[in-house]
Amino acid sequence: MTRKFHVIGNWKLHHFMEDSRKLARAVLDGSRQYLDSMVVGVSPVHTTLWAVHGELSDRPENFWLVGQNAYHENEGAFTGAVSYRHLKDAGCDGAIVGHSERRRIFRESDDEIMAQLESAIRAQLHVIYCIGETGEEREAGKTLDVIERQLGEALRHVPPSGRQAIKFIVAYEPVWAIGTGVNATPEQAQEVHAAIREIIAGRWTSEEADRVPILYGGSLKPSNAREIFSMPDVDGGLVGGASLKADTFLDLVRIASEVAGK
Ligand code: 13P
C-alpha cells in the first residue's frame, strides 16, 4: 500500500484558546506512537492557530496543523478575510478547501472554491478537498454526477508540479451524513471512493490515483469507524463532532492504525 492513512479532526467553530491548546497537546501526545505509519491532524479556529502551532512545536512531520478555510486573495482590501498565505504564516501544514458548510452556509461558488484551491497550492499547503452530494441528490440518483463535477473541476486546477510538491487529499463527505448521526454505510462509502479514484486515474494517471488518500467524513465515531476504514478505497477520515474530545478522537486514530495494514 503506497497510501498512508490520514485522520484529521475538523474542530469547526468550537473551542477557545486554552481548550484548543490542551486538546492539540493531548492529541499529539496520544497519537505519537502511530505517527510512523499514518498522518494525524487537527484543524482549530483561525484565531487560535498560532498558539496551537506553538503548543505543537515538537510535532513530527506526520502531525499536521490544518487551517479550516480561507479566501483566495493573498492580501488587500478584504475586511474580515484570512488568506491561505496567512494560514501558512500561522504555522499550518495543510488546509481544508470546499467544505460543504462553506458551499452551503457561506454561499461560496464553485469558482471561488477553485480559486481557493489554487491559492492553497501556491501557499504550499497540503490540500484536503471536500466533495459530497446532498440527500436530495442521492435520492435522485445523482451522487456520482455531483462527485464527477466537483472533483473533475478541481483536478484541472492542480498543476502537475503541484501533484508532487503538495499532497492532494480528497474527503468524501456526503452532506446528509455531516453532523446528523447518520453515517454512510461502508458499502456506500466504498462505491463513491472507488469512483473518485477512477476519476483521478482518468484525469491524471493511475499511479497518481493510487497515491491520493481519500478520506471519509460524516458522523464518524469509534463505533462505526472500523467497518468504514476497512473498505479498500477508504484511507482515513475527516472528523467533526468526534474530534472535539481527545479520548474519542484518539480512539479513531487507534482504529485507523489497526486497519491501516489491511
Ligand atoms: P461530523 O463528523 O460532525 O459529522 O462532521 C464531519 C465533517 O464535516 C468534517 O469536516
Image (cartoon, helix red, strand yellow):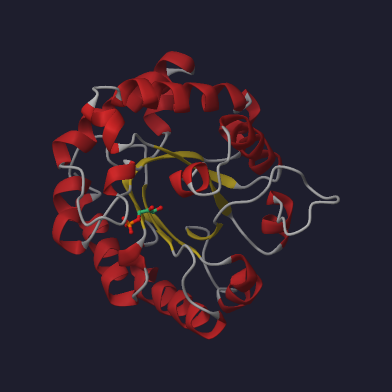
Left or right of 220, for residue 107:
right
Residue at position x 50%, y 41% in the image: 103
Along the line of sight, which residue is nearer the eye, 257 or 184?
184
Q: Quadrant of the C terminus?
A: top left
Left or right of 122, for residue 211:
left
Ligand 1 visible in quadrant: bottom left
Left or right of 14, for residue 195:
left
Along the line of sight, which residue is nearer the eye, 76 or 165?
76
Name of the residue lying farthest toward the top: 202
Image quadrant assignment for residue 225: bottom left
Residue at position x 52%, y 47% in the image: 102
Image quadrant assignment for residue 252: bottom left
Along the line of sight, which residue is nearer the eye, 166 or 42?
42
Residue at position x 53%, y 28% in the image: 154
Whether residue 193 is visible, yes or no, is no
Name of the residue lying farthest toward the right: 76
